[in-house]
Image (cartoon, rainbow, N blue to C red):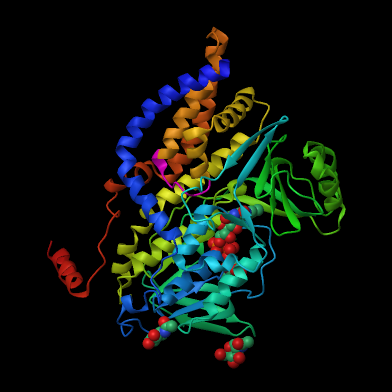
């Protein structure tokens, strides 16, 4: 009963706040949704845009070098190649990557694949449809379904082996005549007078080679060696994911991943093929047992296994016991802090990383590729590096709606899901689960953000406020005693102290007031106009 009352009060206050938010945002969102639907209907101009770019004369030999053919690099190479550009892709290892990162693509990312003409890359790899997650805590559960009703039936999340997906992307890249995909390790960027002119790399026979291009896009992933001169890397590693593959079992709900809010931190299960389930155990960085000496297996068996769903227990234990099955990867957080360098650009994990708990990394990378492709489309000539670099500065603001929403949600949720001994944190977990269970616009909106279908910082702020109101309401009812008021205040304090630093690191202005950022919209440079502009500048 009290629960219903809170829901009522929460709903009223949230609706008032929501009204304000909707008022400012409705137009924009409708436009966004229309665009998404268009993307989802797959009616893309056939023969894409080779013609639109037109004059391939201006596009000199190898206009663009792409370093790394992972998700970001391969998708970018394909879309630029399709636009008629001459692209050289240099990838360290063209064999299928074997890693446990990037195995679930949320629906927002699938829509980006459609926009890029790459949606068939999730076919023929035994990918599984992902429709949502079930959250478990202390025997209670909450279903979070992705809001997919408005889309065609093929639009959903997908889970798969990352290596199979990347190989499909690379195959599409290799099919384009104007794109060369070669194996080699880039060792450094070639810089002249502050302008990046190309790269130095070693080919398979260890021969040192150089390649030149008007624009070099670095997408060498989370362990990037090349980003140092292109951004201010400040990497935080709050936890590690310890992963292994379970066989001979099924998750309780078909097409739903499972997240257990365990102690001290969450466990995630998702089916990555028709016969395998990936389990990833989040282990806080302060206490990571060693895999090699068996301490990890012991930790998993004694501390983690008892918290696993009973139907998965046996498979969980045999997975741990299987030799070489346990892998470990750092969960890195790094805000995008680019250092504008003419002739070069950074995207993907090399530019920006968030905690992997929500599986948003590939979606941010693919969304970035779409933005970059669209920005580059009107440019025929990339030779004036300084002007192009200035024009492309808008990329870092245009990417904020998607990247900041997904980044902040992931980073905040990993903290909320990692129950510390702090009772306010425990409260926050219950609040979040309760909020999701409210259904309606609350869980709908939250899950739309989670799965990349509602890339909107304003929506993030709105849900934060309504969760806070709901949480405090829950604590105060039925009668607000001083202790309850105090607990409510603590809840608000903890919630804001988790959220605000992440908002700050994303940039308040770029997130909420993008129109005030000078670089928000820069018109594509035209040769003649540019000359006049630079002459004017000299005169001033
Ligand atoms: C544990 C974990 C789980 C994750 N789970 C998910 C998930 O479920 N869903 C999701 O969307 N994201 C997930 N992510 C994030 C996701 O993996 C990344 O966001 C995504 O792979 C980024 O793509 P990228 O192209 O930037 O980098 P990568 O895919 O890492 O590609 C980088 C490429 O560059 C190549 N390269 C590196 N250095 C050089 C060099 N010097 N010369 C030439 N080539 C080079 C590499 O060989 C590689 O092919 C997870 C991350 C982690 C750590
Ligand atoms: C490749 O480039 C040439 C000119 O450089 C152009 O005529 C041709 O259409 C391009 N091919 C593709 C597949 O984009
Ligand atoms: C590496 O480059 C050298 C020099 O261009 C070339 O002779 C050699 O065949 C290349 N090796 C491979 C494996 O491509």
Above or below, 5 relative to 47: above
Closer-to-camera residue (209/66): 66
Queried whether the magenta region covers residue 346, the answer comes back as no
| Residue at x 47%, y 60% (from the top left corner) | 112
Q: Quadrant of residue 217?
A: bottom left
Q: Position of residue 168 (x, y in %)?
A: 60, 71
**Res 352 seen here:** no
Quadrant of the image where one finds ligand 3: bottom right
Residue visible at 50% across and 63% down? 113
Report the span colored magenta: 451-458
* Picture quarter with the C terminus: bottom left
Query: Does the magenta run of residues contain 457?
Result: yes
Magenta-colored segment: predominant secondary structure: loop
Left or right of residue 526: residue 463: right
Q: Is residue 20 visible?
A: yes
User: As displayed, is residue 92 above or below residue 306?
Assistant: below
């Amino acid at each position: 009963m009290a629960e219903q009352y809170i829901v009522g009060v929460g709903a009223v206050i949230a609706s008032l706040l929501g009204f304000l938010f909707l008022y400012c945002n409705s137009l924009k969102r409708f436009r966004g949704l229309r665009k998404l639907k268009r993307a989802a209907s797959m009616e893309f101009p056939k023969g894409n845009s080779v013609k639109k770019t037109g004059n391939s004369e201006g596009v000199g030999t190898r206009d663009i070098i792409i370093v790394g053919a992972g998700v970001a690099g391969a998708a970018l190479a394909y879309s630029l190649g399709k636009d008629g550009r001459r692209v050289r892709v240099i990838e360290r290892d063209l064999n299928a990557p074997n890693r446990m990162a990037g195995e679930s693509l949320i629906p927002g990312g699938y829509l980006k694949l459609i926009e890029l003409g790459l949606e068939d890359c999730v076919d023929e790899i035994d990918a599984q449809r992902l429709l949502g997650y079930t959250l478990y805590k202390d025997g209670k559960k909450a279903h979070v379904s992705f809001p997919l009703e408005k889309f065609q039936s093929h639009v959903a999340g997908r889970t798969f082996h990352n290596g199979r997906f990347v190989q499909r992307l690379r195959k599409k890249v290799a099919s384009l005549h104007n794109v060369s995909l070669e194996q080699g390790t880039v060792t450094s960027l070639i810089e002249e007078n502050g302008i990046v002119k190309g790269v130095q790399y070693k080919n398979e026979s260890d021969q040192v080679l150089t390649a030149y291009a008007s624009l070099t896009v670095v997408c060498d992933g989370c362990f990037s060696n090349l980003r140092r001169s292109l951004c201010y890397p400040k990497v935080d590693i709050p936890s590690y994911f310890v992963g292994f593959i379970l066989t001979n079992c099924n998750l309780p709900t078909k097409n739903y991943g499972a997240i257990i809010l365990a102690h001290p931190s969450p466990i995630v299960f998702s089916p990555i093929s028709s016969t395998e389930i990936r389990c990833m155990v989040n282990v806080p960085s302060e206490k990571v047992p060693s895999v090699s000496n068996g301490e990890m297996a012991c930790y998993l068996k004694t501390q983690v296994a008892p918290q696993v769903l009973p139907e998965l227990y046996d498979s969980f234990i045999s997975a741990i016991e299987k030799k070489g099955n346990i892998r470990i990867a750092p969960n890195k957080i790094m805000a995008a802090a680019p250092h504008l360098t003419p002739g070069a650009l950074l995207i993907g994990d090399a530019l920006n990383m968030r905690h992997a708990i929500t599986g948003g990394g590939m979606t941010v990378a693919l969304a970035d590729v779409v933005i970059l492709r669209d920005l580059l489309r009107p440019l025929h000539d990339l030779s004036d590096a300084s002007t192009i670099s200035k024009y492309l500065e808008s990329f870092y603001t245009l990417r904020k709606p998607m990247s900041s929403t997904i980044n902040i949600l992931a980073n905040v949720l990993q903290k909320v899901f990692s129950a510390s001994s702090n009772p306010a944190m425990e409260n926050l977990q219950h609040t979040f689960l309760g909020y999701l269970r409210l259904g309606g616009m609350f869980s709908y909106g939250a899950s739309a953000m989670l799965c990349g279908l509602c890339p909107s910082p304003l929506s993030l702020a709105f849900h934060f406020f309504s969760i806070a109101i709901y949480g405090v309401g829950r604590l105060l009812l039925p009668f607000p005693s001083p202790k309850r008021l105090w607990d409510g205040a603590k809840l608000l304090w903890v919630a804001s102290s988790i959220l605000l630093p992440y908002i700050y690191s994303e940039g308040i202005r770029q997130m909420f007031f993008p129109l005030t950022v000078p670089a928000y919209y820069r018109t594509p440079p035209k040769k003649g106009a540019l000359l006049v502009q630079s002459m004017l500048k000299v005169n001033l």
